[in-house]
Image (tube, rainbow, N blue to C red):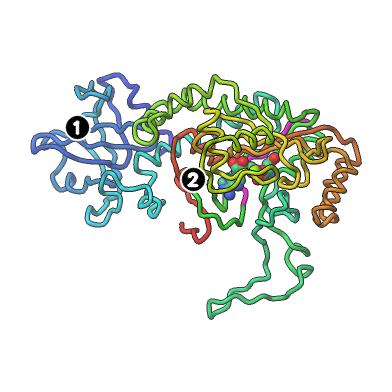
């Protein structure tokens, strides 16, 4: 058996009369004594291939094994399909069953299983319509991401997953240590209480962002990006947070916040157009079953300039809103999810880039504005999600950076190499981080971030 067999996606394009084999998993089987219809899918495309099996062609004992979830190869001939919605079907002349799926036990039996239930069987849910579609969109969006940056001369930097510095300074890091030993009684034993004796000779963590590392490359290679898993030990049980998520982080030298905003907008629109063009059936499904305004919104956003407002303007709009927010709005406080959603969904009704946040609610590395109060931060908010992108122009002046690190009580020694970048050949530079799962939610209309990553990791949840 070679991997180069014809996939179901390609069978749909074949001329009637062609002899072919179709491999896949059975979605359903129905029919009468005279003829059976089997819906087969192999994940290559949204539609199932219909297999028509006339009575007597396949042994009754074998037919009994062809049930929902079983894996089968059907041999036969491509024929025009009289049924609506499909161009061709496969008229079977034989088959081989590879793996049976006991109908009494196979959990993906019934149609209409809830997304919550499917999350509990995440190892099998790719066989259903929704997760097949989510995975194809996710895969295509990753591919298009690399294509977008390669076409524009950005280098892909493989930044480390294990780090000794906290990029966001929010203390949400998972420690990486060989100090914890599992004991026979199921408890942990701490070998030693001295980080100097730990594996790396100092405290180390799973990265919350590849930004600091990718900055080193931008200040030498000019336009770069990193794209990989990042980790946050935040105990928030929301539909938008994961403990392990993928982040795309472009970083550009000789670029300011303006150029950064332009890139964020250009990238988002590029991906939307690419997905509309290349995942047509999947998006049609999401539009029908998950979010009825999806396609309209995506088409609109792909062509419309994002609104740009300052944080101060945003606060003003929120304060004047006749809306009962749970959290108060005051200058200096971070925008809550409800505020972000109101701005982008109710007030501006399209993606909006909010800039120049108070420096006290943002990370140490952001460029400080002359007003002494705000920094050149930018968050991109989109309807249905809220914050999808967070970025900034970086502080490239050594004295300003140093004093900020001190003011915030961060361990200056840990950032020695980061400050070196400002000591030698510093240059204006900017970048952002896009939460990849949040973008997939936006592209598919899926409402829970746990359903757009193959295996979600969140507080109390690390099954599979
Ligand atoms: O706004 P954040 O924290 O920014 C950074 O990490 C910067 N270092 C990025 C940079 O400038 N290179 O995170 C960036 C984005 C957010 O806008 C959000 O979309 C996503 O990452 N994100 C999460 N996604 C899922 N689960 C979480 N717990 C997330 N935290 C942030
Ligand atoms: Mg942020």
Q: Indicate which quadrant contains ligand 2.
A: top right
The overriding secondary structure of the stretch rendered in magenta is strand
Q: Is residue 74 visible?
A: yes
Label 2: element kind: helix
Residue 449, label in figure: 2
The residue depicted at 76 percent of the width and 68 percent of the height is: 195
Q: Which x, y percent locates residue 22?
A: 31, 34
Q: Which x, y percent locates residue 329?
A: 62, 44
Relative to 359, does residue 296 appear above or below in the rendering? Answer: above
Looking at the rendering, which quadrant does residue 291 occupy?
top left
Residue 33, label in figure: none
- Magenta-colored span: 222-231
Instruction: Check mark 2 vs ligand 1: CB closer than 8 Å? yes or no.
Output: yes
Pointer 1: residues within 10 angstroms few (<14), some, or many (20+)?
many
Indicate left or right for 359 with 433 as reference. right
> Which residue does the numbered mark 1 point to in the structure image?
52
The residue depicted at 19 percent of the width and 35 percent of the height is: 37
Q: Which x, y percent locates residue 185?
A: 53, 80
């Amino acid at each position: 058996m070679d991997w180069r067999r014809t996939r179901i996606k390609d069978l749909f394009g074949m001329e009637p009369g062609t002899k072919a084999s179709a491999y896949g998993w059975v979605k359903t089987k129905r029919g009468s004594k005279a003829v059976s219809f089997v819906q087969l899918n192999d994940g290559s495309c949204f539609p199932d291939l219909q297999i028509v099996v006339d009575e007597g062609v396949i042994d009754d004992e074998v037919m009994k094994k062809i049930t929902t979830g079983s894996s089968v190869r059907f041999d036969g001939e491509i024929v025009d399909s009289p049924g609506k919605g499909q161009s061709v079907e496969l008229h079977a002349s034989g088959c081989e069953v590879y793996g049976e799926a006991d109908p009494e036990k196979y959990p993906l039996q019934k149609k209409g299983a809830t997304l919550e239930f499917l999350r509990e069987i995440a190892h099998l849910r790719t066989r259903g319509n929704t997760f097949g579609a989510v995975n194809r969109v996710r895969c295509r969006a990753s591919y298009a991401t690399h294509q977008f940056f390669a076409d524009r001369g950005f280098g892909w930097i493989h930044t480390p997953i294990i780090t000794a510095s906290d990029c966001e300074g929010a203390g949400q890091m998972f420690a990486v240590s060989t100090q914890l030993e599992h004991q026979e009684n199921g408890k942990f034993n701490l070998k030693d209480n001295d980080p100097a004796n730990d594996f790396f000779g100092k405290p180390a963590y799973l990265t919350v962002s590849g930004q600091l590392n990718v900055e080193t490359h931008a200040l030498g290679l000019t336009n770069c990006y990193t794209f990989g898993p990042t980790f946050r030990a935040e105990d928030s049980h929301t539909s938008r947070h994961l403990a392990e998520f993928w982040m795309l982080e472009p970083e550009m030298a000789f670029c300011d916040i303006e150029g950064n905003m332009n890139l964020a907008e250009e990238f988002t629109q590029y991906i939307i157009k690419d997905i509309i063009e290349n995942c047509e059936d999947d998006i049609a499904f999401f539009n029908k079953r998950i979010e009825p305004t999806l396609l309209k919104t995506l088409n609109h956003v792909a062509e419309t300039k994002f609104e740009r407002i300052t944080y101060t303007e945003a606060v003003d709009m929120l304060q004047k809103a006749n809306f009962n927010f749970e959290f108060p709005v005051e200058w200096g406080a971070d925008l809550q999810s409800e505020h972000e959603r109101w701005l982008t969904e109710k007030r501006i009704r399209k993606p909006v880039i909010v800039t120049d946040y108070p420096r006290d609610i943002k990370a140490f590395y952001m460029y400080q504005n002359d007003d002494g109060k705000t920094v050149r931060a930018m968050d991109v908010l989109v309807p249905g999600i809220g914050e999808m992108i967070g970025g900034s122009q970086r502080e490239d002046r050594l004295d300003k950076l140093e004093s900020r690190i001190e003011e915030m009580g961060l361990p200056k020694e840990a950032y020695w190499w980061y400050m070196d970048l400002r000591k030698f050949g510093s240059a204006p530079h900017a970048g952002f981080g896009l939460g990849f799962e949040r973008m997939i939610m936006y592209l598919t209309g899926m409402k829970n971030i746990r359903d757009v990553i193959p295996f979600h990791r969140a507080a109390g949840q690390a099954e599979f």
